[in-house]
Image (spheres, rainbow, N blue to C red):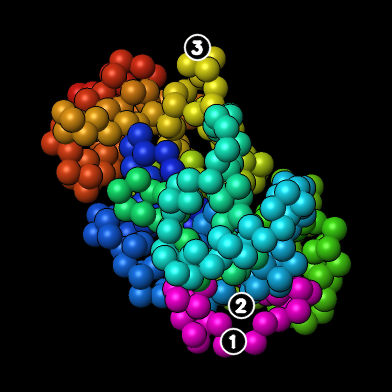
Amino acid sequence: MLDQIGLIQIDSVNVLVRSQELVLFARLGPHPRTLIAEATDTGELFEYWAHEASHVSMVHYHLFRWKMALGHRWQAIQQLHDRRPDFLEEVLAQVEASGPVVSGEFNSRVGPKGTWWDWDDAKLALEHMFWSGKVTARRRPNDFARLYELTERWIPQEALDRAMPTEQEARKELLVLAAKHHGVATFTDLADYHRQKNPPTRPLIAELIEEGRLVPVTVEGWDQQGYLHPDSRRPRRVNARALLSPFDSLVFNRERTERIFGFHYRIEIYVPPPKRIYGYYVLPFLLGDELVARLDLKADRQSGTLLVQGSYAEPGVPTEVVVPELAEELRLMANWLGLDEIRVMPRGDLAAALSGSF
């Protein structure tokens, strides 16, 4: 699966199940929920800022080392250095002595905690060193907090020994990988996949075309140039069926999702409840090669129930086609999550028909 999509975006929201597990479920169906942790422990995955925080295939570790070497320009880091010149080295020494650690173990805050983004000095230092590659991170199972450890203790030596490409070489490789993972894409699609900035990346497209590593194509209905990976397959039909995480790579670029599927999608987690249109945690439903519906789902673990809090068909989609497939996918999900019941709330135009399936 990682050969196909390269990375899995991480998100902490757990109202249904964490996003990274949904990405696997969409492609693998029911599977052991320990897969990501096991793949990380055995050195097949590492976490880094790829497309936001992501699990990334270890074979691509070297492609992010230029980014680590450049570091970042957080003003807060400079302010921290001015206030406490030796603090980063002290934190790194503590990780070396006591790792793996979570930021809370440092207990270095002075004064009351501010708003949710107001990190204490230890958290800031650890995140800076994580970005810079001096430490790496994994997730603690019970509360999903980042555990920080010296990079050489958790990243396999083989990955560390691999030659580090130049920034330009790495950016080109990432564009090619994005084309492989996308199928067909615009330049902005390719750059966005690994969160590359457009200005330093745009001139590389012509080089990749000249090298035969990208193929320019015309896509009907697009006003932008399209690109294909030269090894892209063009299947006659697509028989997919999946409930997709809001952060699945198939849909995490909202403009692309609308351009390809005609599916206007915005996550409403941060929207006040009275202003939500579809619900808190809404998953698009893929059937064949179309996004045909969306569901607001919640796992009520105390009662063992998968709650369908809202269910909506896309315009023109026949209910009689969608409902049986959707009901079967919900049964698979409930069984996978160990939930005994599926309850459909009377919200949305699919609710009545879907409720009759359980």
Give how far apart the Cα atoms at labels 1 and 3 are. 52 Å
Q: Residue 33 lies in magenta, yes or no? A: no
Label 2: which secondary element = helix
Q: Earlier in the sequence, mark 1 or mark 3?
A: 1
Q: Is residue 186 visible?
A: no
Which circle marks residue 172 in the picture?
none
Disc 3: which residue: 274
Of the two numbered discs 1 and 3 in the rendering, the one whose residue sits closer to the viewer: 1
Q: Is residue 75 visible?
A: yes
| Type of amino acid at the residue the image marks with label 2 | His
Q: Position of residue 10 (x, y in %)?
A: 48, 51
Q: Earlier in the sequence, mark 2 or mark 1?
A: 2
For the point 77% across and 52% down, which residue is it?
Answer: 82
Q: Position of residue 184 (x, y in %)?
A: 64, 60
Q: Is residue 353 above or below residue 291?
A: above
Q: Toward the viewer: 60 or 336? A: 60
Q: Is residue 346 above or below residue 291?
A: above
| Type of amino acid at the residue the image marks with label 3 | Pro
**Which secondary structure type mostly characterizes the magenta part of the structure?**
helix
Disc 2: which residue: 62
Q: Is residue 71 left or right of residue 355?
A: right
Marks 1/3 in contact by CB < 8 Å: the verdict is no
Give how far apart the Cα atoms at labels 2 and 3 are. 46 Å
Q: Position of residue 282 (x, y in %)?
A: 44, 32
Which circle marks residue 162 in the picture?
1
Report the magenta residues as a range.
Answer: 151-177
Quarter holding the C terminus is: top left
